[in-house]
Image: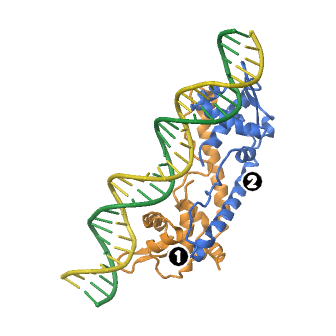
Chain colours: A blue, B orange, C green, D yellow
Amino acid sequence: MNGQFQIAIHILTLLDQAKGELLSSEYIAGSININPVLVRKEIRNLRNYGLITSKEGKAGGYALGLPAKKILFSDVYKAVEHHPALGQAKNKPNPQCPVGRQINQHLNDLADEVDISIINKLNTITLADFSQKFY
Amino acid sequence: MNGQFQIAIHILTLLDQAKGELLSSEYIAGSININPVLVRKEIRNLRNYGLITSKEGKAGGYALGLPAKKILFSDVYKAVEHHPALGQAKNKPNPQCPVGRQINQHLNDLADEVDISIINKLNTITLADFSQKFY
DNA sequence: TCATCTGTAATTAAAAATGTTACAGTACAA
DNA sequence: TTGTACTGTAACATTTTTAATTACAGATGA
């Protein structure tokens, strides 16, 4: 996995702490210490899932799309574009070999199962829980 | 994560199916369709954890270090060099920001928790279970 | 109508993963 | 005792992925 999940959580935490005041991509990027365009890209994703709202134009910016208590970390995990945690099978094994012929299917099934157990875990954590740690 | 876990599982499955007969890195690489050196590198790892034994010299090769029933996928997961599934916090957030100052600690704690739930899941799967799918 | 934002595409740069080459060392067998 | 077929490992090159940058159109409010 890449750093998108961390960035998403960072953004959401900042927005929760802002208590409805709009934050700009530049401000957010300054806290994470990355490029503002990456913030906007990640927010595009999260907005597609209703987790963030945005306002264009002068004095525009971002706010949470839902109360922090209603935002499950599993929602964030699903929203972020990611590969399964175990990694997608990307080798092209030898189809002449009985193992090679089938293994990608079985590996992907396994990865799916693992992903489900991650989601079950993240179902138990809300943004409010996480954000609360910063007080 | 990278493809090492998949490679490790592929290797172990082949070795189980070989029923003790030694397989060469070239044969294994031919099934996975990767470079034999990568196979040897990954096996070095697995051997350090006792999951594989090797024999040098002519007619050398590799075999399982334990019965397939005794090899848990969680052991493989731990043996493979990997980042936590959620990804390690690698940004360098702004220490002037109350969120930035603490977030890496909290993100890493979260990643650890998730990793534990992955391991719990993988504890329930043995190499024998997986290998059985290929008959 | 200017200033300050978002939205997004296109490009470049940096980092990570994978592949390749090369060769020393080991073991067996003729 | 020498050739052959392996492993073990380092060094390097290539490819792929990720992140950063640049650029600019469009929205909004003062």
The percent coordinates of residue D17 (x first, y second) are 56, 48
Q: Nearer the viewer, residue C9 or C23?
A: C9
User: In the picture provided, is B22 more to the left or to the right than A73?
Assistant: left
Q: Judge whether B20 appears above or below B40 on screen.
A: below
For marks 2 and 1, give the CA distance: 33 Å
The percent coordinates of residue B112 (x first, y second) are 62, 50
Q: Report the residue marked by disc 1.
A: B15
Q: Judge whether A100 appears above or below B82 on screen.
A: below
Q: Nearer the viewer, residue B13 or B67?
A: B13
Q: Nearer the viewer, residue D15 or A55?
A: D15
The percent coordinates of residue A124 (x first, y second) are 76, 48
Q: Can you say which quadrant of the picture contains the C terminus of chain A? A: top right
Chain letter for mark 2, please.
A
Q: Quadrant of residue A91?
A: bottom right
Q: Quadrant of residue B67?
A: bottom right
In front of the other: label 2 or label 1?
A: 1
Q: Residues within 10 Å of mark 2 (few under 14, many from 20)?
A: some
Quick check: can you spot residue B99? yes
Task: Give the residue type that dot 1 points to.
Answer: Leu
Q: Which mark is residue A120?
A: 2
